[in-house]
Image: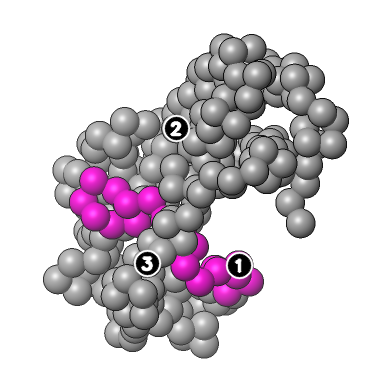
Amino acid sequence: MKTSILSILILAALSVVSPAHESITFGPNGGKLVALDSPATPSAEVVVKESQFIVGLFDKSKKPIALEMQALTITAGERSAPTKLAVTKTADSFTAPLPAGDDFWAIFQLKETPAKKAHTFRIHYQTKPCPECKKPEWLCACGSKTNGANIAVPASLDGLFAEINQHHGELKENFAGKKYEALDEVTKAFTVLLKALPAKSADKSTAVQPQVDALVAVLAAIADSNAGRTLPDAAKNLDAFNTGIAALKKNFPEKTANAKLK
């Protein structure tokens, strides 16, 4: 039965497509930071050092959380022979020996207390170097070069509104789905796009600037709730943002304001 459960976990991981060069958030120790659906434990960082998985827990400000009642289970290895790793707990981290192999899934199940439901997250561990950044593929950050705060601002006003409308849709979708990592990326990119709007608004720039400032402030509030995993508290902020975007678009011709990505 245990083997069957482990196999199911690995199969579940393999069913999740991990796109090449996806965006990644690095933790305080240079490992991969993973979002958890918990205000008490917003993030976990996975580091590989000296042939060990090292897992630390962090609050919304990326400060370490002391380990007390938390427990971690790690399952890793080939689909045909997954292994439950021996996990050691210290005051500030969990450690487990790295299995043999250079390309496998690792499934982490964290329980904050014995009575609480486990938070499950997955890492596709790949040591093969990325051709571009030369980092191991599991830590490749090439996807972050053009996303989030690094998004390129389109040259034309129509192009900018196409991106704004695309990101507005993603903001609402990721908010509703509690897709914390994607929402973090979207709020950063949306801020860059909005801040670029006044300079492209010609004689509308004076009217547009305070509206943009207000929207950026609301985005910051949503991002803060996202970091603390308290999105329900930001529902009114999302409503305010939707209303503000609608008002902003009235400054521009309908065709421009409703432009879509091609």
- For the point 42% across and 37% down, which residue is it? 42
Which amino acid does the dot numbered 2 rest on?
A: Ala
For the residues bearing labels 1 and 3, Cβ distance under 8 angstroms: no
204 versus 41 height, above or below: above
Which amino acid does the dot numbered 3 rest on?
A: Cys
* Gap between marks 3 and 2 measured at Cα: 22 Å
- Residue 189, magenta (yes or no): no
Question: For residue 126, what is the image quadrant?
Answer: bottom left
Residue beneath label 3, please? 140
Q: Secondary structure at mark 2?
A: helix
Q: 207 or 261, which is in the foreground?
A: 207
Quarter in which the C terminus is drawn: bottom right
83 versus 13 height, above or below: below
Residue 57 vs residue 175: left or right?
left
- For the point 50% across and 48% down, which residue is it? 151
Q: 164 or 136, which is in the foreground?
A: 164
Specify the color scheme.
Answer: one colour
Task: From the top left corner, tell me how far across and down residue 67 is, in percent.
Answer: 25, 40
Q: Nearer the viewer, mark 1 or mark 3?
A: 3
Q: Earlier in the sequence, mark 1 or mark 2?
A: 1
Q: Secondary structure at mark 1?
A: loop
Task: From the top left corner, tell me how far across and down residue 249 is, in percent.
Answer: 75, 24
Residue beneath label 2, please? 227
Q: 56 or 162, which is in the foreground?
A: 162
Which amino acid does the dot numbered 1 rest on?
A: Val
- For the point 54% across and 68% down, which residue is it? 18
Q: Label 1: how many residues lie within 10 Å, few (<14), some (14-19) or many (20+)?
A: few
The part of the chain drawn in magenta is 13-32
- Residue 21, magenta (yes or no): yes
